[in-house]
Amino acid sequence: MRTPTRRAVLGTGIAFAGGGLLAACSGSGTDHAGHGDKPPAGPEGYVSPHGKEVAAAETKRAASASGSVRKVKLTATPARLDLGGRTVGSWAYGDDLPGKEVRVTAGDTLALTLANHLPQPTSIHWHGLALRNDMDGTPGLTQPPIRAGASYEYRFAATRPGTYWFHPHSGAQQDRGLYAPLIVEDPKEPLTYDKEWVVVLDDWVDGVDGSTPDAVLAELGNGMGGMGGMGGMDHGGMDMGGHGMSTMSMTTTTTTAKTTAEEAPSAKPSGPSRMLMGATSKLLGGDAGDVAYPYYLVNGRTPDDPQVFRAEPGDRIRIRFINAGGDTAFRVALGGHTMTVTHTDGFPVEHAETDALLLGMGERYDVLVTVKDGAFPLTALAEGKKRSALAVLRTGGGAAPQPSVRPKELDGRLLQARQLRADGSVRLESGRPDRTITLKLTGSMAAYDWAINGRKYDPARRYPVRSGERVRLSFVNRTQMWHPMHLHGHTFSCGDGGPRKDTAIVLPGRTLDVDFDADNPGLWMIHCHNVYHAESGMMTVLGYRK
């Protein structure tokens, strides 16, 4: 029998209320500050996020729901966050990093009210969930932005068990402290385990020596064109030891004045340069990332003061990994142990053993581990960046692992999504696509002009699909960087019989074809989950035709 030991903690701030579902789950999205206007309609002929087709799909989805409603109140606010020996000003959900978990059971309706106490508009995107379109949390497309001082109710049926998370879809806010896990439990859980841990990985820059994600984006947006003879070079091919140029100023307007969490983000670069040069990884096909983060975190803690997970020798542990980073892939291993992969992006796979996992931004993996006696490092290596995050598993005596520990499992067997097979219960049936949409990933570090098919994001430009179609997305990466591509509101199959996912790594110079069934009408984002690539333009919209 499993014991969800985190439930007492996770339940904080979550009130349960019984009651029947309202018609179409009452996805009102009410803004209690009176800002109730809808986003621009865009071109005619497409299903509106507030249209009858969306309501009908939600009614169908909720038909098997339990009728239970989970009510949550959440506040986005400036906060002082203790990262473990370093306190920084940032924005967060309450005063926790990550934000307190929201946990529901499949079939519940989640009714979450977000109060915005930030100095700028915000939103919540429910990463990985197939939910009603008007609750997807993409301002200007599916909802109006939630103004400073306003509140907004998200209400939808959560019908698919799995490991998910939520974060803003407003500017570079995700690279602050605004993220939290969302766990949808399976009422017929087939796995057996003694304890469950949720492990959130992150790269951290906000509030460190005056840096903000907005300043990082502004610096990166200048590209490398102003670097003299280096302007046309691929920075991923420069061997400078990962951080050899991380303190080199790439701009002419660098300042060390600190930006507090109470101030609105500045459009000007602030703090030291955060542009990363020479980060390379064979696993990622070359260039590993753009940003030199000062810290890498597990559950909001640095390696100098890590979280300690406690268990008894022989316990079977379920670990749910979530990569909430902005620009970093993590290679994860538990020293002295093998892991059995059971799920990716919320969907079960045929069980497979591995020593290590690679998670791009937005990806999730569930694993089972039978723990040994002692103290062991749970290390998340920032792939290609030569630094790591750390937590500790302690089941007995022994010295605590050092912050710089590199367990041998990091260089052992490594499973990637393409090697996994979907569990038969969720495997997408084989079939020829009715429609193929080619999405060429374009841009370069030199100009920082990331885009899809050479066009920067425009919410009025849609790639059309129709309900009932089998759709193939063909991601063609024409850049020298890897991109974790994320589809909202759906899951796709990675190859014939491959795992069901909503986020997948596309390596440089490679093509990745994924298939999904168009069964959730509305307007849905497709974008790179590198927050800086997305905000520079590597986003587009999938639109259902009426």
Image (spheres, rainbow, N blue to C red):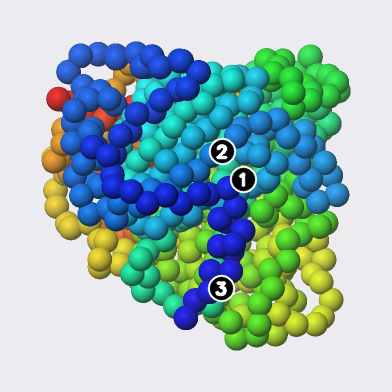
User: Where residue 296 sits: x, y (%)?
Assistant: 71, 48
Above or below: residue 347 compared with residue 115: below
Q: Does label 1 or label 3 sit earlier along the sequence?
A: 1
User: Where residue 371 sits: x, y (%)?
Assistant: 62, 80
User: Where residue 452 sits: x, y (%)?
Assistant: 40, 27
Residues tagged 2 and 1 counted as in contact (Cβ below 8 A): yes
Query: What is the CA distance from the residue labelled 1 to the residue labelled 3?
Result: 21 Å
The numbered mark at residue 74 is 2
Q: Does label 3 or label 2 sit earlier along the sequence?
A: 2
Is disc 1 placed on a helix, strand or loop?
Answer: loop
Q: Quadrant of residue 485?
A: top left
Q: Which residue is mark 1?
A: 99
Which amino acid type is marked by label 1? Gly
Query: At 67% from the left edge and 15% from the top edge, which residue is drawn?
Result: 267
Which amino acid type is marked by label 2? Leu
Q: Does label 2 or label 1 sit earlier along the sequence?
A: 2
Q: Which residue is mark 3?
A: 195
| Mark 1 surroundings: few (<14), some (14-19) or many (≥20) residues within 10 A | many
Q: Quadrant of the C terminus?
A: top left
Query: At 74% from the left edge and 20% from the top edge, which residue is drawn?
Result: 263
Camera-side residue of 330 and 263? 263
| Mark 2 surroundings: few (<14), some (14-19) or many (≥20) residues within 10 A | some
Which amino acid type is marked by label 3? Lys
Is disc 2 placed on a helix, strand or loop?
Answer: strand
